Image: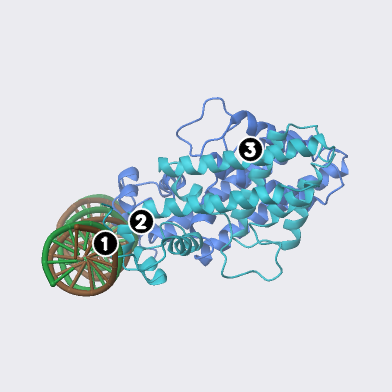
Chain colours: A blue, B cyan, C green, D brown
Amino acid sequence: MARTGRPREFDKEQTLERALKLFWSRGYGATSIQDLVDALSVERGSLYGTFGDKRRFYLEAVRLYWEVYERRLIATLDTSPLLPALREILTHPARLDEFISDVGVPQGCLVGNTTAELVPQDTEATEIVARSYSRFTEIVTAALERAQAAGEVTDKARPEAQASMLLYLVQGLSLVSRAGLDRTAALAAIDTAVDGLRA
Amino acid sequence: MARTGRPREFDKEQTLERALKLFWSRGYGATSIQDLVDALSVERGSLYGTFGDKRRFYLEAVRLYWEVYERRLIATLDTSPLLPALREILTHPARLDEFISDVGVPQGCLVGNTTAELVPQDTEATEIVARSYSRFTEIVTAALERAQAAGEVTDKARPEAQASMLLYLVQGLSLVSRAGLDRTAALAAIDTAVDGLRA
DNA sequence: CGACTTCTTGACTTGGCGTTCAAGAAGTCA
DNA sequence: TGACTTCTTGAACGCCAAGTCAAGAAGTCG
């Protein structure tokens, strides 16, 4: 058994990554299968055979996006002091941390984009998105608990509340940055928020 | 001259308002002309004759949305003390201020949704959205300047920075609330942010 | 009334989309 | 080698969207 037939001619993971970038920059609706065929150099039938229909393909890309993001989030927060790390997380989605914006990497957050485009109509998308937000809050809450215990972050508010606030800030930054933002004002806003957490 | 022909049988402003609600709840792409025809009880030809194509119709709805929002924003902030008003502005998009969510009124912010769906591809949408964000920041900045002068809000940060932070928070709340949010956590997050502004 | 203008109606055109499929190619295994 | 399985290719399908238009209806004005 496990009779293997003709081997796939393209790399599945790499293709998913490239599709992710396309979905990320154009959105779900505005990315047609033809766009994917052109950009990925994989024919329609092969895409359908490998990834299922467009919606499954997209949701798989969102899952991958979050998986990568979550890993980076955890790694970034695994430091002391915490506040500079939080600052980095906030500056990242709007690419405020880079002097020359990398045109190859899209702006914003794919989970946020998905929220705007597919939630709440699509229940599966809603689940993925809601889970991502929960995970973000959990991870940041844990980091804030440590930082409160270490006396770095104020304990005037509960870590959960602080983490939620940071979630809203990141998502707001990701979204607004699409319309282009004043770099200086945005950085000052982030500093204001982070300073508010200082003990 | 100004020969008037057959008068329009529907109310233009009211129809735009109803279209706005539909666009608001479903988004631009997911709202078809047929949906509008059904919901507004106005035939296709009449819609095209009155509002131009779908995109113009939508952008007009966004303009109206912002016009109404801006008026409310100014009215809400025209009080002292300011912090409770800011709190109201933050709780509003996610309908956290109402015990029973009004199913007739959609969640989130139409400007934010437009940002996610049409920006930056559509330059006209980008202009409208960017202008709305600027206006929000200007209005809130002016209010914060007064509140800083009155000693209600801390002057450790510039009003512009505080206003930008509030913009990101509102937009983040609007977006994340689509996926459903923990009421208590969200309110606590808002309080955390608002407390951070206190003098 | 009769000329003129504008609005209404809904069938129609056009185009692009997601999806399917049949025929052939490229492997594996006995 | 030949049976079998899986992948590749691109034409074809069906659908539904946005947008158009011609004929008629409902007003105004001289």
Disc 1 marks which amino acid?
A: Gly
The residue indicated by pointer 1 is B5
Q: Earlier in the sequence, mark 1 or mark 2?
A: 1
Chain for disc number 1: B
Query: In whole angstroms, how far apart are the C-alphas of marks 1 and 2?
Result: 18 Å
Disc 3 marks which amino acid?
A: Glu
For the residues tagged 1 and 2, is the chain the same?
Answer: yes
- Mark nearest the camera among 1 and 2 is 1
Q: Earlier in the sequence, mark 3 or mark 1?
A: 1
Q: Is residue B6 left or right of residue B96?
A: left
Front-lying residue, B104 or B63 = B63
Q: Is residue A6 visible?
A: no
Front-lying residue, A95 or B196 = B196
Contact, CB < 8 Å: mark 2 with mark 3? Answer: no
Q: Is residue A70 left or right of residue C8?
A: right
Residue A58: give x, y in percent of width and height: 45, 55
Residue C10: give x, y in percent of width and height: 24, 74
- Name the secondary structure under disc 3: helix
Residue B6: give x, y in percent of width and height: 28, 65
Chain for disc number 3: B
Residue C8: give x, y in percent of width and height: 29, 69
Contact, CB < 8 Å: mark 3 with mark 1? Answer: no
Chain for disc number 2: B
Mark 1 neighbour density, 10 Å: few (under 14) some (14–19) many (20 or more) = few
Disc 2 marks which amino acid?
A: Phe
**The disc label shown at residue B122, or none:** none
Query: In whole angstroms, how far apart are the C-alphas of marks 2 and 3?
Result: 31 Å
**The disc label shown at residue B138, or none:** 3
Q: Write down the quadrant of residue D21 in the picture.
A: bottom left
Q: Earlier in the sequence, mark 2 or mark 3?
A: 2
**The disc label shown at residue B51, or none:** 2
Front-lying residue, B5 or C19 = B5
